[in-house]
C-alpha cells in the first residue's frame, strides 16, 4: 500500500488504494510506463491536496476525483490527459495549489482543461453578472470550443455529483438537478454520450419529481414480462429470416429509460401503457464499413417482408448522420397482434458510436468534415465576439442542443447543417453576419423566397442582399438558430446603444416616483418579466415610449389576486440565511404568485423562487419554467410548504376525452357541481371524429379534492381519459 497522509484512517487508506487500482484496471487506452507514472503523480497530488477535506457524507473528498477519473477511463474510454484532469479538477478550486503549479508539473494542456472546469469565484464577476450558474457555464463552453476534454471532465464530474446527491440539502438537490436536466443532459446528447445523457436525466427526475419516477418504474415492472414476451415473439421470425439470408446480426430488446418515457407521456398525453415504444428492438449487423448502407437497407427490406411498416415514421440517419455521429435506421412495424413496434437497424460500428458518442466518433472518423465538426464550428462562432449576458448565452446555446437537423446547399454545392425549422435568414447569418444583416430574400431551388421562408431538407439556397437593408427586431420572430440570434442581436445592439443613457435616466425617474430602488436586481427583474435580452433593450424600450410607468407598476405589484389571501397556506424558509436575505425576508413574505404555467395546488410539491421587490413565484418543481429559473438562479430558491388550514380555492385545469353522445355535458356538470360541490371557472367542448375534448377549469382546495374529481369523472361511462393540464 502507498504512503498516505495521516488525516486518513487506516481503513480509508486501504479504500483509496483499492479505488486507484480499480482506476488503473479500467483504463482502456494506451498505458505505457510513462503514462502510468504521470497518472500516479496526479493521484498523489490530489490525495495530499484534499487531505483535510470531507464530503457531506463524511467520506474523504479524494473519493470524488477518483470517481470522476474512473468514469472518464471506464465509461468514456479517454486517455492519460483526461484521467489526470479528472484527478486534479478540483485542486485549483478547493486547495492551495494554483494553475501555475499544475502547468509546471503537468503541462499547459492539463492546466487549461482544469481551468476550464474550475468555477469562477466572486472576484471574477463583474457588476453586470446576472447569474453565477450561467456565467460558469459560459466559461465551460468557451473553454470547450478550443478543447473538448473540458466538457468531458465536467460531464464526468456532474455524473458523479448526481449519483451522490442524496447527501445534499433539498434546495441544493433542486438547483443541481434542474441545471443538469436543463443543460448538461442535452449537452451529453449532443456529444453522442447517450448512456451519460439517460442516467443524468433519470437522476434529475429522481429529485425534481420522485413520485413520477417511482410510479413509472412500478408500472414498467408490472408490464415487463408481458412486453418482453411480445417483443420475443416479434423478433423470432426476424432472426430466422436474417440467418436464412446469411446476414450476421445480433438482436437486442431494450427498455427505454424512465425519463424518456415521462417525456413521451407529457408530449403525447398518454399513459405508460399507451406509449408504444417503451421497448425497442435493435438489430446490430456485423459487416464491413463499405457494405453498411446496403446491409442496413437489406435488413429493412427483410423486415417489411414480415411485418407492415409505417412509412411516415421512417427515420434515415444512415444516409444523413446526426451531428454527434449517430447513425441508424429507425422504423415502426406492426406485429401480428396489431401493435406498433419500433425497430432500430445499425452496424457494430454505429452501435459503438451510439453508445460512446464523441469518443468513438473521433477514434474512427474519416478525413472529411463531419456534422460534429460543423456543430463545433457553430459553437466557436457563438463564443467569438459574444457580448450577450450569460443568461442570453445559455439560452442561445441550449437552443441548438435538442433540435433535429436538416441539410441544405449553397449554389456551389457546399452542405450547410441547420436545425429543423430554420429559415432563409438563419441560413444567411450562418454564412456571415454581414450577409444576414443585409439579407432581403433568397433564391431557393431557383424560386424567389422571403427571408422568413422555412427551409426543407436538400434545398439549394442563394442569398440576396441589399446595402439598404438593416437588421430589425421583428426578425427574432422567425429565426431559430443560436448563431443567427446572436449575430442579429449584435447588429441591433449597436443601434440601441445610442438610446442607453436617455432610457436609463428615464427609468431612474420612474423608479424614484414609484419608490423602488434603482438596483441591478430590480432592473434585471424587468428584463426577465418582459422577456428581454438585456438591459440595453430595457433602456431602449423606455426611451422610445414602449415601456411606460404604467407597465412597470403592473410588473412590480402582485398579479395574482389571491396572493394576499392565501399567504397563510404557505410557509417559507430561506435556504441560505445570509444577512442580506434575512434583512429582506419580512418584506419578501408580503405576497407571492401561484404560477399560471403549472397551476400548483395544496398537496403538490412546490418550490418558491424569489427576486427582490417581486412577489415570490410558486411553481411545481418539475415545471419547465421552474427548471429554467432554478438552472440559472439556484441561490434564489426558497423553501415552501403548503399548510392545510382554513378554506380557499385554487384553479386546476383538466382535459377530458369522451365519446360524443347526448347527455355527456349533463353528466359532467352533475359530477362536478352536484356531487362534489365545486365551482367551475370555465368549460369548453370540441367535437371531432366522434370524440369530444373538454377543457375544464375548476376551483379545488387541495390535491385530494382534485384526485377525487378525476376519479369520479373517470367513472362516467362516456369518459375515456382525464388528464391534469399542468401547462398553458
Image (spheres, helix red, strand yellow):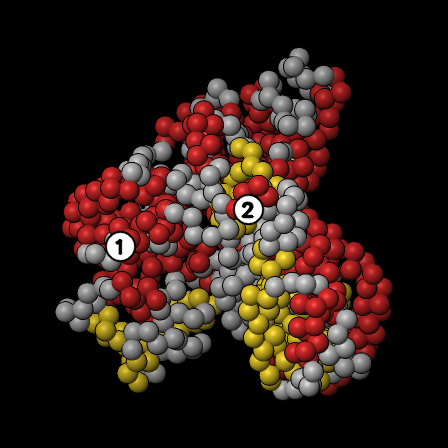
Determine which of the numbered discs, if any, sits on residue 566 in the image: 2
Disc 1 or 2, which lies upstream in sequence? 1
Residue at image location 38% in from the left, 75% down from the top: 454
Classify mark 1: residues with Cα within 10 Å, few (<14), some (14-19) or many (20+): some
Q: Which numbered disc, 1 or 2, marks the residue closer to the eye?
A: 2
Classify mark 2: residues with Cα within 10 Å, few (<14), some (14-19) or many (20+): some
**Distance Cα–Cα, label 1 vs label 2:** 31 Å
Q: Is mark 2 on a helix, strand or loop?
A: helix
How far across and down, in percent of the image, does residue 700 sit?
63, 57
Determine which of the numbered discs, if any, sits on residue 547 in the image: 1
Above or below: residue 264 compared with residue 622:
below
Residue at image location 21% in from the left, 67% down from the top: 438
Q: Quadrant of the N terminus?
A: top right
How far across and down, in percent of the image, does residue 684 sit?
56, 75
Residue at image location 47% in from the left, 32% down from the top: 585
How far across and down, in percent of the image, does residue 92 sit?
48, 27
Residue 150 visible in this rendered orientation of the protein: no
Task: Judge by depth and name the residue closer to the eye, 169 or 647.
Answer: 647
Q: In which quarter of the image is residue 283?
A: bottom right
Above or below: residue 521 compared with residue 97:
below
User: Does 15 sit left or right of 100 as displayed?
Assistant: right
Residue at image location 67% in from the left, 67% down from the top: 673
User: Does 324 sit left or right of 125 as displayed?
Assistant: right
Amino acid at each position: 500500500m502507498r504512503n498516505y497522509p495521516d488525516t486518513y484512517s487506516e481503513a480509508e487508506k486501504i479504500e483509496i488504494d483499492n479505488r486507484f487500482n480499480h482506476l488503473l484496471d479500467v483504463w482502456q487506452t494506451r498505458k505505457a510506463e510513462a503514462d502510468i507514472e504521470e497518472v500516479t503523480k496526479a493521484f498523489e497530488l490530489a490525495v495530499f491536496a484534499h487531505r483535510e477535506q470531507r464530503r457531506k457524507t463524511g467520506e474523504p473528498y479524494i473519493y470524488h476525483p477518483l470517481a470522476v477519473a474512473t468514469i472518464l477511463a471506464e465509461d468514456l474510454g479517454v486517455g492519460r490527459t483526461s484521467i489526470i484532469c479528472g484527478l486534479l479538477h478540483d485542486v485549483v478550486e478547493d486547495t492551495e495549489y494554483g494553475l501555475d503549479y499544475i502547468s509546471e508539473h503537468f503541462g499547459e494542456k492539463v492546466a487549461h482543461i482544469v481551468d476550464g472546469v474550475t468555477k469562477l469565484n466572486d472576484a471574477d464577476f463583474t457588476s453586470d453578472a446576472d447569474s453565477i450558474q450561467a456565467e460558469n457555464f459560459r466559461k465551460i463552453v468557451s473553454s470547450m470550443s478550443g478543447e473538448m476534454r473540458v466538457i468531458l471532465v465536467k460531464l464526468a464530474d456532474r455524473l458523479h455529483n448526481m449519483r451522490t446527491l442524496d447527501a445534499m440539502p433539498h434546495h441544493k438537490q433542486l438547483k443541481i438537478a434542474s441545471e443538469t436536466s436543463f443543460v448538461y443532459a442535452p449537452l451529453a446528447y449532443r456529444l453522442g454520450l447517450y448512456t451519460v445523457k439517460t442516467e443524468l436525466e433519470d437522476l434529475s427526475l429522481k429529485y425534481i419529481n420522485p413520485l413520477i419516477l417511482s410510479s413509472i418504474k412500478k408500472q414498467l415492472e408490472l408490464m415487463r414480462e408481458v412486453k418482453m414476451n411480445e417483443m420475443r415473439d416479434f423478433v423470432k421470425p426476424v432472426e430466422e429470416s436474417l440467418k436464412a439470408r446469411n446476414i450476421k446480426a445480433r438482436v437486442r430488446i431494450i427498455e427505454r429509460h424512465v425519463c424518456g418515457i415521462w417525456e413521451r407521456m407529457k408530449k403525447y398525453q398518454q399513459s405508460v401503457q399507451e406509449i408504444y415504444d417503451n421497448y425497442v428492438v435493435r438489430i446490430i449487423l456485423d459487416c464491413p464499413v463499405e457494405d453498411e448502407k446496403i446491409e442496413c437497407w437489406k435488413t429493412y427490406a427483410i423486415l417489411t417482408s414480415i411485418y407492415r411498416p409505417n412509412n411516415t415514421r421512417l427515420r434515415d440517419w444512415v444516409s444523413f448522420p446526426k451531428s454527434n455521429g449517430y447513425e441508424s435506421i429507425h422504423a415502426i412495424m406492426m406485429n401480428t397482434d396489431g401493435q406498433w413496434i419500433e425497430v432500430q437497424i445499425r452496424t457494430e460500428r454505429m452501435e459503438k458510436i451510439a453508445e460512446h458518442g464523441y469518443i468513438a466518433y473521433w477514434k474512427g472518423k474519416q478525413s472529411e468534415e463531419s456534422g460534429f465538426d460543423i456543430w463545433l464550428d457553430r459553437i466557436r462562432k457563438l463564443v467569438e465576439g459574444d457580448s450577450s449576458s450569460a443568461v442570453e448565452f445559455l439560452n442561445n446555446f441550449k437552443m441548438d442542443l435538442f433540435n433535429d437537423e436538416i441539410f441544405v446547399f449553397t449554389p456551389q454545392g457546399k452542405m450547410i447543417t441547420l436545425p429543423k425549422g430554420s429559415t432563409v435568414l438563419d441560413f444567411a447569418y450562418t454564412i456571415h453576419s454581414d450577409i444576414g444583416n443585409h439579407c432581403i430574400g433568397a433564391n431557393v431551388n431557383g424560386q424567389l423566397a422571403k427571408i422568413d421562408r422555412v427551409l426543407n431538407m436538400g434545398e439549394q439556397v442563394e442569398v440576396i442582399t441589399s446595402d439598404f437593408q438593416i437588421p430589425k427586431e421583428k426578425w427574432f420572430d422567425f429565426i431559430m438558430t443560436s448563431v443567427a440570434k446572436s449575430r442579429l442581436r449584435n447588429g441591433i445592439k449597436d443601434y440601441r446603444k445610442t438610446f442607453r443613457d436617455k432610457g436609463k435616466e428615464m427609468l431612474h425617474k420612474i423608479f424614484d416616483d414609484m419608490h423602488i430602488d434603482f438596483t441591478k436586481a430590480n432592473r434585471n427583474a424587468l428584463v426577465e418579466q418582459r422577456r428581454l435580452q438585456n438591459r440595453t433593450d430595457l433602456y431602449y424600450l423606455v426611451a422610445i415610449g414602449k415601456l411606460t410607468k404604467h407597465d412597470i407598476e403592473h410588473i412590480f405589484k402582485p398579479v395574482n389576486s389571491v396572493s394576499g389571501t392565501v399567504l397563510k397556506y404557505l410557509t417559507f424558509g430561506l435556504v441560505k440565511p445570509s444577512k442580506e436575505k434575512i434583512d429582506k425576508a419580512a418584506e419578501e413574505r408580503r405576497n407571492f404568485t401561484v404560477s399560471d404555467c403549472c397551476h400548483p395546488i395544496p398537496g403538490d410539491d412546490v418550490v418558491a423562487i424569489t427576486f427582490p421587490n417581486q412577489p415570490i413565484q410558486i411553481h411545481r418543481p418539475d415545471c419547465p419554467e421552474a427548471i429554467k429559473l432554478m438552472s440559472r438562479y439556484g441561490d434564489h430558491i426558497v423553501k415552501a410548504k403548503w399548510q392545510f388550514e382554513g378554506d380557499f380555492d385554487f384553479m386546476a385545469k383538466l382535459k377530458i376525452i369522451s365519446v360524443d353522445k347526448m347527455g355527456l355535458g349533463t353528466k359532467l356538470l352533475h359530477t362536478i357541481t352536484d356531487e362534489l360541490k365545486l365551482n367551475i371557472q370555465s368549460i369548453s367542448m370540441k367535437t371531432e371524429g366522434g370524440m369530444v375534448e373538454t377543457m375544464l377549469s375548476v376551483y379545488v382546495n387541495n390535491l385530494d379534492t382534485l384526485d377525487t374529481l378525476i376519479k369520479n369523472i373517470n367513472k362516467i361511462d362516456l369518459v375515456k381519459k382525464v388528464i391534469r393540464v399542468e401547462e398553458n
